[in-house]
């Protein structure tokens, strides 16, 4: 059982470049989430998808877009990367909303120079 | 604005001691309070969770205490072990969103 799979594991971008972070889950979960983790800031919610076909902004959505491609996949896009977006990005999924355990991937470490 | 506050930022405990991490929240719509444990290079994993209709929940060496009127909850780790050394996050959920605290780095020394 793979659980939540994130690709790539590492990425270096130049300022202004774009990229898409991929996330897929094989647990038939309805809800999916994107977080960024920065030292001293904990995990901050970027966007979430409570169910297939819906997406909503979290705490720090500026500079990001998301697509819930199907029930399994939830991608995060940076259209024009900035150094402030240097972070570790985690994707998570849960059976139904936030009132159930979230399962996390192992993260994507992104550096923007 | 941090909707979930957590303290201390870091904690050093001797093996066999009790580790205590405290959290506070502001939004009374929160109705699910999980704790997650994260090891270096890995994603967080659920440790234990509580709902506001109970004041305490215990699973092995881990206990959550919940004070609804004070809007506070805490994690107690009894008989702390070196293998418990990790970062701990409290979180709160108003159904769809899950909001995390800033984390506590716990080191258990022999």
Image (tube, coloured by chain):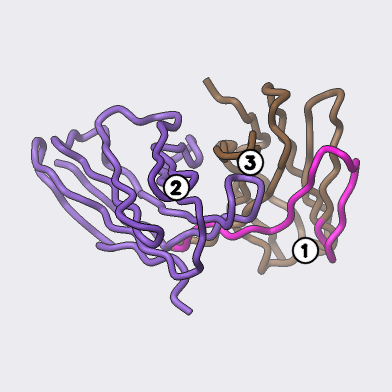
Chain colours: A purple, B brown
Q: Quadrant location of the C terminus of chain B? A: bottom right
Q: Which of A111 and B18 is in front in this view?
A: A111
Foreground label between 1 and 2: 2
From the image, tell me which residue sits under label 1: B15
Q: Residue B23: say if magenta.
A: no
In this picture, is A34 found above or below A57?
below
Q: Which residue is drawn at 26% across and 53% down?
A: A21
Compared with A32, A2 (above or below) is: below
Residue A33, numbered circle: 2
Residue B59 placement (x, y as % from top left): 83, 62
- Return the x and y of residue A52 as percentages of the image width and height: 42, 50
Question: Measuring 43% from the left and 62% from the top, which residue is drawn there?
Answer: A105
| Dots 1, 3 in contact, CB < 8 A | no
Pick out the residue farthest to the front. Answer: A53
Residue at mark 1 to residue at mark 3: CA–CA distance: 26 Å
Q: Secondary structure beneath disc 1?
A: loop
A78 in relation to A100, above or below: above
Q: Magenta span has B51? A: yes
Secondary structure under tag 2 reads strand
Which residue is label 3 attached to?
Answer: B91
The numbered mark 1 sits on a residue in which chain?
B
Q: Where is residue A40 in the image (x, y as percent from the top left)?
A: 49, 36
Magenta residue span: B42-62
Closer to the N terminus: mark 1 or mark 3? Answer: 1
């Amino acid at each position: 059982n793979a659980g939540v799979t994130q690709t790539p594991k590492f990425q270096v971008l130049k300022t202004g470049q774009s990229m898409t972070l991929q996330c897929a889950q094989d647990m038939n979960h309805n809800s999916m989430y994107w977080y960024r983790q920065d030292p001293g800031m904990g995990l901050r919610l970027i966007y979430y998808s409570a169910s297939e076909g819906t997406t909503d902004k979290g705490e720090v959505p500026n500079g990001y877009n998301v697509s819930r491609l199907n029930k399994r996949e939830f991608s995060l896009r940076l259209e024009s990367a900035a150094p402030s977006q240097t972070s570790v990005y985690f994707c998570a999924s849960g059976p139904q909303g936030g009132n159930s355990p979230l399962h996390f991937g192992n993260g994507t470490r992104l550096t923007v120079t | 604005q941090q909707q979930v506050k957590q303290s201390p930022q870091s904690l050093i405990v001797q093996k066999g001691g009790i580790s205590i991490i405290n959290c506070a929240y502001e939004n009374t719509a929160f109705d699910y309070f999980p704790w997650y444990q994260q090891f270096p290079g890995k994603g967080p994993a659920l440790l234990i969770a509580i709902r506001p209709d109970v004041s305490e929940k215990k699973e092995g060496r881990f206990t959550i205490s919940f004070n609804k009127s004070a809007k506070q909850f805490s994690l107690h780790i009894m008989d702390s072990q070196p293998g418990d050394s990790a970062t701990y996050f409290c979180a709160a959920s108003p159904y769809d969103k899950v909001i995390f605290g800033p984390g506590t780095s716990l080191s258990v020394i022999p």
